[in-house]
Amino acid sequence: MRDSNSRQDLEEDSRSCLDRSSGIDAASYRDLFSLARNGILLCGVSKGGSCTILNANPAALRIERLSRDELVGEEFERAILGAADFGIMDLIREVNSSGVPLHISPKRHSDSRTDILRDMSVHRLNEGVVAIVYDDVSDSVDACTKLGESKPELDRLVSNLPGIAFRCKNDREWTMEVVSRGIIELTGYRPEEIIGNKELSYSDLIYAEDREMVWGLIQESFAVGDRYEIEYRIVTRSGQVKYVLERGKVVAGESGGEVFVEGFISDVTDLRVARREAEVNKEKLEATLTSTINALSRIVEIRDPYTSGHQRKVGLLAVSISRRMGLEDRLSENIRISGLLHDIGKLWIPSEILSKPGRLNYIEFEMIKEHSKLGYEVLKEIKFDFPIADYVIQHHERLNGSGYPNGLKGEEILLPARIIAVADVVEAISSHRPYRPALGIEVAIEEITSGAGTLYDRSVTRACVDLLEDGFTFE
Ligand SMILES: [Fe+2]
């Protein structure tokens, strides 16, 4: 290696060489040299053809993993390991003599210290001075190689997918540019028949009544730059109608301007049939439950004809109060069912007590009081959406703890039970009983108003009075 004075001399030589080569000021050249992302080696070429490194920019030092001292002033062949192997020296001499820049395709050099794939070009700056501009392209070439290796695998994967991976123009024909082979199983048509609308367009495959909807939804998603998901029907080559789910996005083409749709289409016919069957089964189950509830409710009334329609009417008033109070629909519906079943425990009370005209004695009344607990025992076995058995056992509880069977107070009583309690009292007072005539709505309003806050929930009472004053009827 030369001493530092000699190296300074060389760097000076290279700088003056750069400075002379154009009208751009020397400082700008030096900045360019230092900041360039490519490695730049300035070399002096002797008449005998030997090549000495005059200067090296920071990028070259980084690529070679060498210090300035290890590069500047050294023979090119000795400093740049592997240089002799790929004919760069001949190239340098040729460029120095012809002045025509040359590029050498990427050459790899590996040793224990480095693994570099140099992509180099050689330019003559002045006679006897050349610049070697280069980069280590290992990473990008490796990435390309891996991509190339994985592409057939990716193609095979896409073609084996149960569905259609596609890219098409955003036009009314959905002109296909790329279609995976899954289209054969799904539609019976081959990609080559569809691509470029050769035999028919993808739009022709879409069930006629669904075409406008598909077009409209994809354009909407395009307008907001969002992905889309559409379910529609297609007609296969054999004339079978299938349901498909298409997920995709409208994307800009590489050259800009034209837009394309890219996405995936899968067969959801079986899924849709299963979903429809599940819906039908659910509807059937709900209908069965409704008729069972109605039948149970009727049984009580058959045994106690004097309270005919009582449970149905309580259910009707209770659901109306719930809605008036703004409770959600499903809870309101379950409160209606609770009203329909609230006296089901009376099935176990002797009918002569139930239909006894006149006042009940203490023992008879204690027997009657058992009905809310008995109702709970029956209903707790049924899986409702809400705890209907709990609402039923609490429907004779009162806010001040004077009710039965557990003497619950205030908030201990569930809101649905507080609603049924009010509906129950109002219906009982306003209807005919074997031991008295109907007392009327006015008396019912008076009863719940005077008991509001002590026996009955204030907000429930208010909602019920509002309903009655608005003309609510049990019919
Ligand atoms: Fe009751």
Image: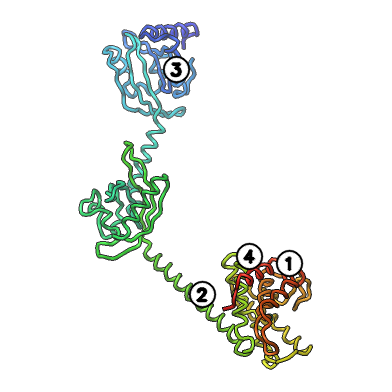
Residue at 39% x, 53% y is 247
Would residue 264 be found to the left or right of residue 334 on screen? left
Q: Amino acid at mark 1?
A: Glu
Residue 141 point in image, percent of width and height: 37, 34
Q: Looking at the image, which residue sits at the far left?
A: 199
Query: Which amino acid type is marked by label 3?
Result: Asn
Distance in Å between CA atoms under marks 4 and 1: 17 Å
Say whether residue 160 is visible. no
Confirm or deny contact between disc 3 and disc 2 (CB under 8 A): no
Q: Name the residue carrying label 4.
A: 325
Cα gap from disc 4 to disc 2, whole angstroms: 26 Å
Q: Quadrant of residue 92?
A: top left
Q: Give the labeled residue for mark 2.
A: 286
Amino acid type assigned to the residue bearing label 4 in the image: Met
CB within 8 Å, label 4 to label 3: no
Q: Which mark is residue 411?
A: 1
Q: Residue at x 48, y 16 (%)?
A: 68
Residue 474: give x, y in percent of width and height: 59, 78
Judged by depth in the image, the label closer to the viewer, 3 or 1, is: 1
